[in-house]
Image (tube, rainbow, N blue to C red):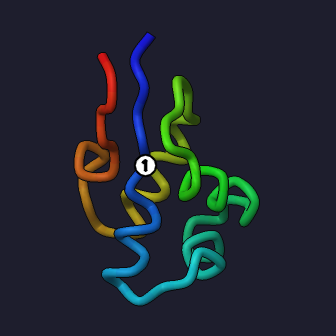
Amino acid sequence: MGLIRLRVRELAAEKRWTLKEVANRTSIPYTTIVTYANSPGMATVDYTALHKIARAFDIAIEDLVEILEE
């Protein structure tokens, strides 16, 4: 199974948003956003959350996800 990393922290920094602001803009619980931002690699992630985060940053999902291992 592959691993991915979400670029939440980097994208938030570019927009000068806090992780709390990302949570508010996406309606995703803050604890989930923090988990995504701090995780060095995940095997699974909620696709709906990916869509909401990408939409908040106005980017494609592909630009949010970094593939670490296929």
Q: Residue at x 72, y 66 (%)?
A: 30
Residue 68 sits in quarter: top left
Q: Residue at x 46, y 46 (%)?
A: 50
Q: Residue at x 30, y 33 (%)?
A: 67
Q: Nearer the viewer, residue 40 or 7?
A: 40
| Location of the C terminus (image quadrant) | top left
Mark 1 lies on a secondary structure that is strand
Does 41 appear above or below 19? Answer: above
Instruction: Report the residue marked by disc 1.
Output: 6
Residue 64 lies, in percent from the top left, at 33, 51
Residue situated furthest top in the rendering: 1
| Location of the N terminus (image quadrant) | top left
Task: Please give left or right for residue 18 compared with residue 4 in the image.
Answer: right
Residue 55 lies, in percent from the top left, at 38, 61
Residue 57 lies, in percent from the top left, at 35, 69
Residue 42 lies, in percent from the top left, at 53, 32
Does 15 appear above or below 39? Answer: below
Residue 46 sits in quarter: top right
